[in-house]
Amino acid sequence: DLDTVRIGQPVRIRFSPSEDGAPVPTFAPA
């Protein structure tokens, strides 16, 4: 969630492959 990044909490971004082949960024709490 981009709002979490903007607030400044530590987050982890993971790129997950999606069905159409393009990686999708997934935000998770660090």
Image (cartoon, helix red, strand yellow):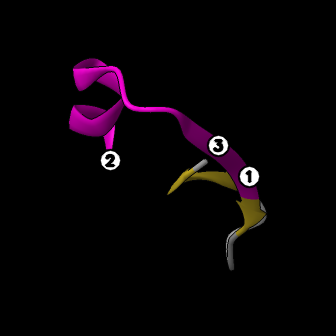
Q: Mark yes or no: residue 12 visible.
A: yes
Asked whether 3 falls inside the magenta stretch, the response is yes
Amino acid type for the residue under numbered disc 3: Ile
Q: How far apart are marks 3 and 1 (CA)?
A: 7 Å
Magenta-drawn segment: 1-15
Amino acid type for the residue under numbered disc 1: Phe
Amino acid type for the residue under numbered disc 2: Asp
Dot 1 surroundings within 10 Å: few (below 14), some, or many (20 or more)? few
Along the viewing direction, whichever of 23 and 6 lies nearer the viewer:
6
Q: How far apart are marks 1 and 2 (CA)?
A: 13 Å
Q: Is residue 7 above or below residue 1?
A: above
Q: Which residue is rendered at x = 74% and y = 52% of the image?
A: 15
**Quick check: 7 left or right of 10?**
left
Of callouts 2 and 3, which one flags the residue occurring earlier in the amino acid sequence?
2
Residue to which mark 2 is pinned: 1
**Image marks 3 and 1: residues in contact by CB distance under 8 Å:** yes
**Of circles 1 and 2, which is in front?**
2
Residue to which mark 3 is pinned: 13
